[in-house]
Image (spheres, rainbow, N blue to C red):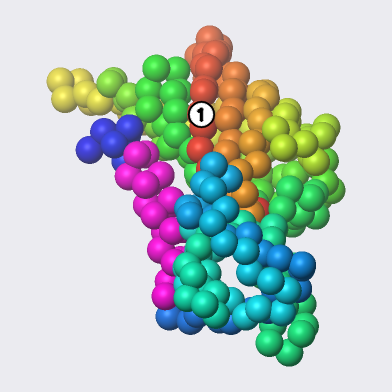
């Protein structure tokens, strides 16, 4: 199976898993909450573009039926079913009048993160690449990251393991740029059947830049460019460009 196909399947699986997880919670448990604001607007669909067709008043009890990303489908005491955005649901109370911990994160929580992990795919010098990584934030502006990359090319395959430093000058921005430097090892396995070629293992260093686009809750879209230098034993170092994009989650 081609790397691009594998990448698409992983992305679909990642997104599908999120949808199944959030839907399953409210399929098995449909809690009732109290409206604490003067009113709660119900829309005909999960989006700002859908019209408001009903308003629940302060003190009304509404039952949560399901969730779709940041939208909740609720039912009022009069049997009206509609969609409410998380920002409004966050002001509701439990049946004892206490505030509810929804476990929802926002962009400001990224500056207080400790761990980050994700995967991405792209192009490594003309070959397909798939990368998984785990990062630890030393400060809001500096993170350490360990990543592994599988490279699949026409003439050879490769595996890269590296350690990186990421520097975020503006971690609180919705589109937050960063710079990265790092080093690691690349193992290259040539495709050959006529002449038995030996696998190669070389040191690799890189510098690059990228950006995180905050999506919602704990999820980010990451885009990155790296310029790799493979330090070969033949004294003819190779320069390789890598472009990649994918998803990450922080906690």
Q: Residue at x 55, y 80 (%)?
A: 77
Pointer 1 local density, CA inside 10 Å: few below 14, some 14–19, many at least 20: many
Residue stretch rendered in magenta on the structure: 7-27
Quarter of the image with the N terminus in it: top left
In the displayed structure, does residue 185 sit left or right of residue 180?
left
* Residue 141: percent from left, percent from top: 82, 41
Q: Residue at x 25, y 25 (%)?
A: 191
- Viewer-side residue, 118 vs 60: 60
In the rendered image, residue 31 lying in the magenta stretch gets the answer no
Q: Which residue is mark 1?
A: 244
* Residue 15: percent from left, percent from top: 43, 51
* Residue 3: percent from left, percent from top: 32, 34
Against 185, residue 235 (above or below) is above
Q: Is residue 100 visible?
A: no
Task: Please tell me whether mark 1 sits on a helix, a strand or a loop.
Answer: strand
- Viewer-side residue, 180 vs 53: 53
The picture quadrant where one finds residue 17 is: bottom left
* Residue 207: percent from left, percent from top: 67, 23
- Viewer-side residue, 14 vs 224: 14
Q: Residue at x 65, y 28 (%)?
A: 210
């Amino acid at each position: 199976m081609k790397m691009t196909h594998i990448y698409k399947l992983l992305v679909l699986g990642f997104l599908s898993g999120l949808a199944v997880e959030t839907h399953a919670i409210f399929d098995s448990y449909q809690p009732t909450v109290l409206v604490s604001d003067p009113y709660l607007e119900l829309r005909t669909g999960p989006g700002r573009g859908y019209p408001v067709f009903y308003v629940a008043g302060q003190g009304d009890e509404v039952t949560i039926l399901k969730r779709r990303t940041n939208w909740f489908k609720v039912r009022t005491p009069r049997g009206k079913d509609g969609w409410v955005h998380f920002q409004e649901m966050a002001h509701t109370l439990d049946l004892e009048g206490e505030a509810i911990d929804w476990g929802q994160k926002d962009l400001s929580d990224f500056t207080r993160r400790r761990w980050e992990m994700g995967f991405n795919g792209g192009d490594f010098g003309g070959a397909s690449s798939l990368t998984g990584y785990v990062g630890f934030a030393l400060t809001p502006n500096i993170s350490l990251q360990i990543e592994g990359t599988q490279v699949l090319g026409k003439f050879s395959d490769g595996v890269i393991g590296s350690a990186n430093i990421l520097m975020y000058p503006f971690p609180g921005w919705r589109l937050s740029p960063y710079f990265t430097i790092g080093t690691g090892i690349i193992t290259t396995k040539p495709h050959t059947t006529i002449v038995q070629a030996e696998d190669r293992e070389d040191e690799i260093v890189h510098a690059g830049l990228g950006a995180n686009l905050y999506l919602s809750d704990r999820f980010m879209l990451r885009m990155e460019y790296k310029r790799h230098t493979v330090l070969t034993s033949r004294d003819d170092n190779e320069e390789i460009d890598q472009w990649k994009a994918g998803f990450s989650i922080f906690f």
